[in-house]
Image (cartoon, helix red, strand yellow):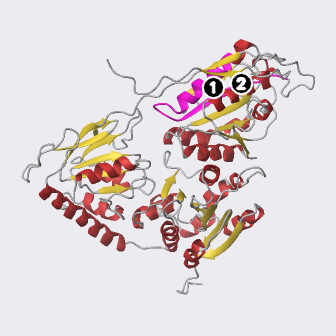
Amino acid sequence: MHEPSAPIPAPLTIPAPRPTGSGAVDQAVAVWSALAELGLAEAVLAPGSRSAPLVYGLAADEVAGRIRAHVRIDERAAAFTALGLGRSDPARPAAVVTTSGTATAHLHAAVMEAHHSRIPLLVLTADRPAELREVGANQTTRQAGMFRSLVRLAVDLPAPTAEAASPVELRTAVSTAARALAAATGEHPGPVHLNLSFRDPLVPRADRPESPEQPERIVVTRRVPDPSPAPQPVPVDFRTIVVAGDGAGPAAAALADAHGLPLLAEPSSGALTAEGLVPRYPALLREVMADPAHPLRPRRAIVLGHPTLSRPVVGALLGAADVEVVVVDPHPDWPDVARRASLVVPAAIGQEIPEAGQETVSPLTAPDVPHATEPATARRRAWIQAWRTAADAAAARLPQPWQQSAALAVWEASGPGDLLVLGSSSLVRDLEQHAGPTSAQVIANRGLAGIDGTTAMAGGLALTRAARDEPGERGRTRLLVGDLTALHDLTGLLVGPEEPRPDLDVIVVDDGGGRIFSGLEHAAAPPALLRRFFTTPHGADIAAVAAGLGADARTLEADALPAALAQPTQGLRVLVIQEPPSEVPGNS
C-alpha cells in the first residue's frame, strides 16, 4: 500500500453571513468569505450599480481586511490589473468585478490572454435576474456563457431571494465559488467566469434583521491538486537543441545544461541563466535553416514553453522536414504551430541515444541521471561556443536603430530582484535579436502573442510586489513599452488612496507606431501612406497624462536613458524616450 504523501486537510467551514436585508448582499458576502478562506487576496472593481452587492460584500465584517480591493475606472484596465496581480503566484489568482451590460465585454481581451497564457483569473460579472433578461431592460445583454470558449468554468448563478438568501442559495454560491477557484488553479489553469444575478435591493437595508446567536456553518470545498507529472524520457544527441519559449521556466535551462545542449531562449522564457544559452540567435538561425548543409544545422529540437516571437524558430526550425520536434508541456493545448511534433511529454528527462557515425555515449550512470561521457561533454561545449560565436557575428551584421539601443539600456539596467515587463512586439524582438543573459525576472503578454493590457498588467504586478515584499528587499518593476501600447491602459496606473504605492518605471519608446507598420506586411506601401495613416506620435501626450497621474514624468533622448535608469527613485516614474536628432541632414 502507498503511504499518504501529505496529511489529510481538516474540513473547512465559514459562518453564514449576517442577514443584511438584501439577498444579493447576503450571497456576495458568502462568495467573498469562501474565496478568502481558500486564499484569494486581491480583487479589482470597476464601478457600477448592479455590482454594488459585491462591493458591500467586500466591506462586510466577515470579509473586511482579508481581500484587498483595487478600483479602476475602466473595465479593460481593471481586468488586466487583476491579471497582473495574480500572475506572480498562480496559486493565488485575483478577481475582477464588473457591472452588467457592455462593461462585461471590456473584459474579453484579458480573458483571452489569461486563457492562452494559462493564468488563473476569476471573472465576476453582475447581471440582471431572469425576469429582466430578453425583455429590453436597461444594461442587460446575454452575459451568461459569453467567454465560454476561453474559460475553464462558466456558471450562471441564479439571483437569490430578494430580502434574504436562503440556506440552499448560500450553499450553492459557496460551492460554486470553491469550484471556480479550483478550476482556475487546477491542472489546466486559466480564467473562470461566474455570472451573478442580483435583484433589488442591491444594498443592505437600514432596518436589517437581527443576526442569530449561532449562525449556520457552510462547508467550503477544497480540492487537492494533482501532483506534478513524472518526467518522461526524450531523445538527446549531439545535434539536439533546446528551444525555450515564453514561460518555459528553469526546466528548459536544466535540461539543456544537463546534456550540454545549445539553448535558444526568448526574452520572457525564464531560462536566460543557462550555461548553454545562445544569445542573439535569430539572425544566425535564419542562415542555418536556409542551408540544408550548414554545419550547425540541428536534427532535433526539444520545445518548452510557448515560442511565438521568431519566424526562424516557429517556421524554419520547427517546420523543417529534417528536424524532429519534441514538445514538453503538461497541458492538453500544447504548442505545435508547424504541426510537426512527433512526441509530447508532460515533463522531460533527457536520454542519450547513440549517434550514427559519431562516438557513442555512455549508458546511464544512475537510473535517473543520464549524461554523456567526458569526451562528448567537451565536444558539446565546443558546439555551444560555435553557436555563440556565429550568433554574435550574425547579429552584428544587423542594423541597430535607436529603439533597440533604448531597449538594451533597460535590459542591462535590470538585475537581481528586478521585474522587467515587456509590452511591445517590436521591442521584444529587438531584445531577442541583441540582448544577452539577465538575472532579472522577465515576463510579457505572450500567451496570445499580444501587447494589449500590458501597462495595466505591469501596474498589477508592481502592486503585488509592493504588498508582499519588504521595501528594502524588492527591486524595481520596469515596463518597457511602445507609445501606442502605453496609451491603451494608462488608467490602469491610477492607484487609490488606500492602495500601496508601487515602485514602477514605465519606459515608453515614442516611435509613433512607425515600426509596427513598416514590417513585412507593409514593405511595398508608399511612405506617404504610412505617414498619413499608420503613425501616431504621442510622446508628449503620454508625458502630460503621466504627470497628471502624479508620476515623475520626463521626456529624454535615447542616449540619456542609461543615466536616468541609474538614478535612485521611488513610486511611479514615466520616461518617454524619443529619437535623438539625426546628424545626417534630410531632404527638404
Cα–Cα span, label 2 and label 1: 9 Å
Q: Residue 342 is drawn in which quadrant?
A: top left
The answer, for residue 149, to whether it is visible in the render is no
User: Horizontal placement of 296 versus 304: left or right?
Assistant: left
Identify whether 328 is placed above or below 355.
Answer: above
Identify whether 444 is placed above or below 326.
Answer: below
Residue 192: say if magenta.
Answer: yes
Residue drawn at point x = 47 percent, y = 62 percent: 519
Residue designated by label 2: 30
Residue 348: say if magenta.
Answer: no
Residue 387, percent across and down?
26, 64
Residue drawn at point x = 34 percent, y = 44 percent: 338
Residue 165, percent across and down?
77, 17
* Quadrant including the C terminus: bottom right
Q: Residue 13 is drawn in which quadrant?
A: top right
Mark 2: secondary structure: helix
Residue type at mark 2: give it.
Ala
Residue type at mark 1: give it.
Ala
Residue designated by label 1: 177
Marks 2/1 in contact by CB < 8 Å: the verdict is yes
Residue drawn at point x = 19 percent, y = 59 percent: 380
Closer to us: 44 or 487? 44
* Quadrant including the N terminus: top left
Report the magenta residues as a range.
171-200
